[in-house]
Image (tube, rainbow, N blue to C red):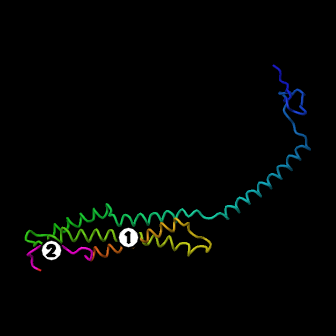
Amino acid sequence: MDTTKTPAPNAAEADTTPVALDKAETTQPAEAAADSAVTDEVTDADLDDEALAEDEAEDREPSHVGSAAFAIVSAGLGVVALSGSWVAGIVSERASIAARLELTQAADANAQIAAQFVDPWHTTAMVNGIFSALALIVATFVLALPAFSSPERTLPTWVRSVSWAGIGLGALGVLLFVLMYFDLLLAIPKAAGAGA
């Protein structure tokens, strides 16, 4: 087995001396000093690069992930408030059952209608009104947040748009809550022939 180096075919000047594999390489003191000087220069260059990277990180704009998340949550709460939620259904059923249990057999038709229709209707309006108010508060918070931070910080356009959608849906939900809870949207049904 031949352990000599063969020159590269395209090399202009190749080292053709055989290499002894059993001898460890020893560095000369002059070479060691030159290596440490190069290491010091590299270290200073690395430090300069790290300082530059930190400056670039400070100059980058914030990602607005929190604001974007809250904007989406506000729009979602507004949609849930308008379409109804599982919580509103459960609370409405509970109000219906509680009102029926309070009824006596001798209750007139209007009292039965109030127990089976009006109480659950108002309870559903109340739960949806809470969701609407939360949507309105969260969306307003997202839009007002840049006013309390640095003046050059602005939200991305899509985050502001989603927040405005949350405000619109929340305001519509609050309006529907008022109309439903105070029976302005639909009148309470009355039994025919029952006493006024």
Q: Is residue 171 left or right of residue 193?
A: right
Residue drawn 21% across the image and 66% down it = 96
The amino acid type, in three-letter code, at marker 1 is Ser
Q: Could you say where residue 114 lies in the image, as x and y percent from the top left?
A: 18, 72
Tag 2 secondary structure: loop
For the residues labelled 1 and 2, say whether their Cβ atoms are less than 8 Å apart. no
**Closer to us: 32 or 17:** 17
- Which quadrant would the C terminus be assigned to in this image? bottom left
Q: Residues within 10 Å of mark 2 (few under 14, many from 20)?
A: some
| Pick the front one: 30 or 146 | 146
User: Quadrant location of the N terminus?
Assistant: top right
What amino acid is found at the position of numbered circle 2 in the picture? Lys
User: Would residue 73 be counted in the magenta stretch?
Assistant: no
Where 76 falls versus 1 (above or below)?
A: below
Give the total of numbered labels: 2
The answer to which of 40 and 192 lies nearer the viewer is 192
Where residue 154 sits: x, y (%)?
Answer: 58, 70
Q: Residue at x 88, y 39 (%)?
A: 27
Q: Which residue is mark 1?
A: 132
Instruction: Label the magenta part by its dominant secondary structure.
Output: loop
Give the residue at mark 2.
190
Q: Nearer the viewer, mark 1 or mark 2?
A: 2
Disc 1 element: helix
Position of 36 relative to 2 (above/below)? below
Whichever of labels 1 and 2 marks the residue nearer the N terminus, that label is 1
Quote the CA–CA distance across marks 1 and 2: 30 Å
Q: Residue at x 67, y 65 (%)?
A: 59
Position in image of residue 80 (x %, y %): 36, 64
Q: Residue 178 vs residue 67: left or right? A: left
Question: Which residue is located at x 69 percent, y 61 percent?
Answer: 56
Q: Which residues are magenta?
A: 183-195
The residue carrying pointer 1 sits among few (fewer than 14), some (14 to 19) or many (20 or more) residues within 10 Å by Cα, namely many
